[in-house]
Image (cartoon, rainbow, N blue to C red):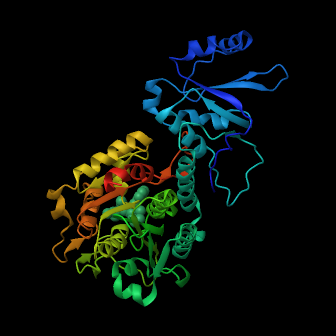
Amino acid sequence: MTLAFLPPETPAIPLIAVSSDTLDPVLSALPPPQEAWARRARFRGKGGETLVLPAADGGIDTALVGTGSAGEQARGRFLVAQAVGRLPAGSYRLEGLAGEALEEAALGWLLASYRFDRYRKPEESPTARLVAPEGVDAARIERVASAEALTRDLINTAPADMGPADLAGAAQALAERHGARVTVTGGEALARDFPLIHAVGRAAISARAPRLIDMHWGDAGPLLTLVGKGVCFDTGGLDIKPASSMGLMKKDMGGAAAVLGLAAMVMGEGLPLRLRVLIPAVENAVGPDSFRPQDVLTSRKGLTVEVNNTDAEGRLVLADALALAGEGDAGLTLSMATLTGAARVAVGPDLAPFYASDDADAAALMQAAAQVRDPLWQMPFHAPYEEMIEPGIADLDNAPAGGMAGSITAALFLRRFAPPRYIHFDIYGWQPKPAPARPKGGVGQGARAVFAALPALLEL
Ligand code: BES
Ligand code: ZN
Ligand code: ZN
């Protein structure tokens, strides 16, 4: 789904953004009947609060939307976007905001207009649309919002309709829109060259066989390699998950969905860089050919891995993709994965934890995250825990007993395979209950922050 503004010349109702600081002057400047109406309605300018001011003919003359106090803005983002669900259908022109606040409101508006209607046509509910605001790069905001919509669509799609082949199809469709090239490795070549991806995915039926998706775009500039976990459904394998944990595992390709969204932003903007996107796409299935606990697998890089839990499959498939990323000219490598439950316990669903080999890269990400309201939290590649991933019988253990520091040990595991300059995100990819601009369901995390940080990260 593409998310777009109305053209700037569209006739529209003025929608005045009001904070608690500007409430009084804004209300006093209204025609007296409207001022009286707004005061009688006790409009306060709370975040997302709306009020329509009637015209003499019964139409809407003007509308107000609250931006909220600093305290409200610290507790939530995209507050103005709540107006989308509260205002009567119509075209609105946002006034009274500038700079980052205007960008947030405009982006939030589009993100709040997102609907997932693949399986259920929405009731004909005409919505409140926004005219492309002046003073911001509206086309860029539309690209970012549409890329986020792609990520959400991919995650929200039922797992029967989003197997490894479907994920490859989605990458192919995106590539075609932007003149990128995609190669997909499967079958015997995958078994030979990407043994961990093959081992995790081989129990699936042939229509859902494992594969590695490799997309290239651009031919000049610094190299950015994105790697996304594409586990199209995670049953846990033989170490099968209980129903309560398996219930959300269609989202285990959320890392792949997030890097495809990020790739859409990069290519749509035409950034002067070379982009590579690697997605190991598998189904972690239960079957006679499932890989087993205590199997020892030899990875593409040559490191051996003892499987101590078939449910720690993400790090296995990513390991082979990261090894490929490190062959030849590596540049900056960034992975995104719904990798551990431990990351959720640590930071909850709203924050995206990340690990970075370079402190300067981490600082650039944190700064961009605050700017575009895509919150991140830096975690440590804590070297003293390296011994926790060394089982003795093989080079590496995919699931250290006890699970202490589970997100960190997973990140350390990935680092063994990654090129030196490396950033890793352990994302959740799911909005558990509706929030402004984020309906319940699949959600992109980190991609907007990375996109905003790219000029600093790659000196563009
Ligand atoms: N896909 C899961 C991680 C996950 C679970 C992410 C719930 C988000 C929400 C991953 O493959 C997994 O099962 N990891 C295990 C690893 C453990 C066995 C070492 C986990 O985190 O429990
Ligand atoms: Zn798992
Ligand atoms: Zn998984």
Q: Which of the 4 image quarters holds residue 134?
A: top right
Q: Is residue 56 above or below residue 337?
A: above
- Which one is nearer the viewer's eye here, 335 or 6? 6
**Residue 83: x %, y % from top left:** 63, 33
**Residue 347: x %, y % from top left:** 36, 45
**Residue 393: x %, y % from top left:** 18, 77
Q: Is residue 292 above or below residue 107?
A: below
Residue at the image position 47 percent from the left and 35 percent from the top: 100
Q: Quadrant of the N terminus?
A: bottom right
Residue 226 shown left or right of residue 63 in the figure? left
Q: Quadrant of the C terminus?
A: bottom left
Q: Is residue 105 above or below residue 2?
A: above
- Which one is nearer the viewer's eye here, 260 or 307? 260
Residue at the image position 33 percent from the left and 63 percent from the top: 222
Q: Which of the 4 image quarters holds residue 317?
A: bottom left
Find ligand 1 in the image and state its quadrant: bottom left
- Which one is nearer the viewer's eye here, 79 or 299? 79
**Residue 392: x %, y % from top left:** 15, 74
Work out which residue is located at the far bottom of the displayed protein and give it: 188
Work out which residue is located at the far right of the displayed protein and give it: 57
Residue 428 shown left or right of residue 409 in the figure? right
Residue 264 shown left or right of residue 89 in the figure? left
Residue at the image position 65 percent from the left and 28 percent from the top: 15
